[in-house]
Image (cartoon, rainbow, N blue to C red):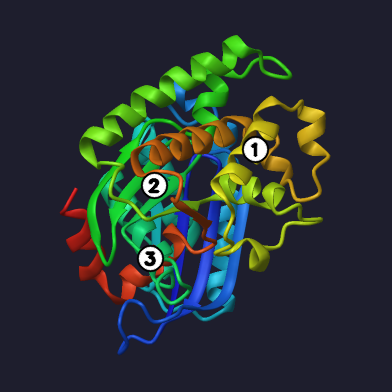
Amino acid sequence: MRVAAVDCGTNSIRLLVADIDETASETTPIVDVVRRSEVVRLGQGVDTTGYLAPEALARTLDMCREYAEQCRHHAVPPGNVRFVATSASRDASNADEFIAGVREAFGELDVVPEVVPGSEEAALSFTGATGGLLAAGFEGPYLVADIGGGSTELARGTHEVVAGTSLDIGSVRLTERHHRTDPPTQEVIDAARFDIAEALDEAEAQVGLGGVTTVVGLAGSVTTVAALALQLDSYDPSAIHLARISIDEMMTACERLILSTRAERAAQPFMHPGRVDVIGAGALIWWEILERTRGANGPDLVVTVSERDILDGIALSIVHPAVVEDESATD
């Protein structure tokens, strides 16, 4: 079955066109046809204003039209496209304008954008990220951390989500709140850390961070940190996906990005231009998650990074809708 998944977040909009064997289980590998990610910064200023800026909306809808053309080109049937909008769309007072624009962009493909709750976002991320972990030698229970632009989703479980939550901390949100100096001062870093600590206190109460064998990091902030830890000369998804990186190496890479200047970040050969301004805040969130989970589980905690994430979960949910519905109900 050919399907298309769109994940529209605060910082980027991503497309996956894939073939999935609908007679197989939800752990059957997805065959990628197209996988794209573009930075559109839909959530520009939402944390302050509460609405989607006209220029951000225009950028995003332009990319929606391009993605719709790719779906047509690759013969995705009408009704087989699922478009999931996350943090920025949940928070914006003019989300209806965004939804109408997306429906118009996709036209006859019959796309109804879904502004999903944080619990479902966490479940979709978990489903997408964990399908191949056991086969790759990573044992559960897992804590899956999906660090987005506006929110961070945490989900814990092995074969299914035991508990999950969405936290109002993300790379764009924290950058707009705090990161106004170059490089950031200790005062700026401490203020952002306070917000992250409050959110992780909430996560410990709702999800629990103990009893975890493997932490799995998702999304651009985490994969960029991993690229630095691996000392890559360019962004290489095959090298990053399911890499085993020690927690100390990962946290050292986080610290380098947190403390660096904008020019130093931009000079990194693996850095996406749209991530230069926000990677420091994203790396700080990832550092704090690693520190908190190491404290709860001890130094033998295993850390990896997955290029399979919420996009894969969305695609699987088209073929196996009951899987994610059941998981999100456990939040």
Q: Position of residue 312 (x, y in %)?
A: 44, 66
Q: Position of residue 225 (x, y in %)?
A: 63, 45
Tags 1 and 3 in contact by the CB under 8 Å rule?
Answer: no
- The residue shown at (51%, 25%) is 174
Of the two numbered discs 2 and 1 on the same chain, state the one appearing first in sequence: 2
Type of amino acid under label 2: Ile
The residue that mark 1 highlights is: 252
- The residue shown at (39%, 47%) is 99
Type of amino acid under label 1: Thr
Of the two numbered discs 3 and 2 on the same chain, state the one appearing first in sequence: 2
The residue that mark 2 highlights is: 99
Depth-wise, is mark 3 or mark 2 nearer the camera? 3
Which mark, residue 139? 3
Q: Position of residue 193 (x, y in %)?
A: 48, 21
Q: Position of residue 58 (x, y in %)?
A: 58, 41
Type of amino acid under label 3: Glu
Tags 2 and 1 in contact by the CB under 8 Å rule?
Answer: no
Q: Nearer the viewer, residue 52 or 28?
A: 28
Q: State which quadrant residue 194 falls in.
A: top left
What SS does tag 1 mark?
Answer: helix
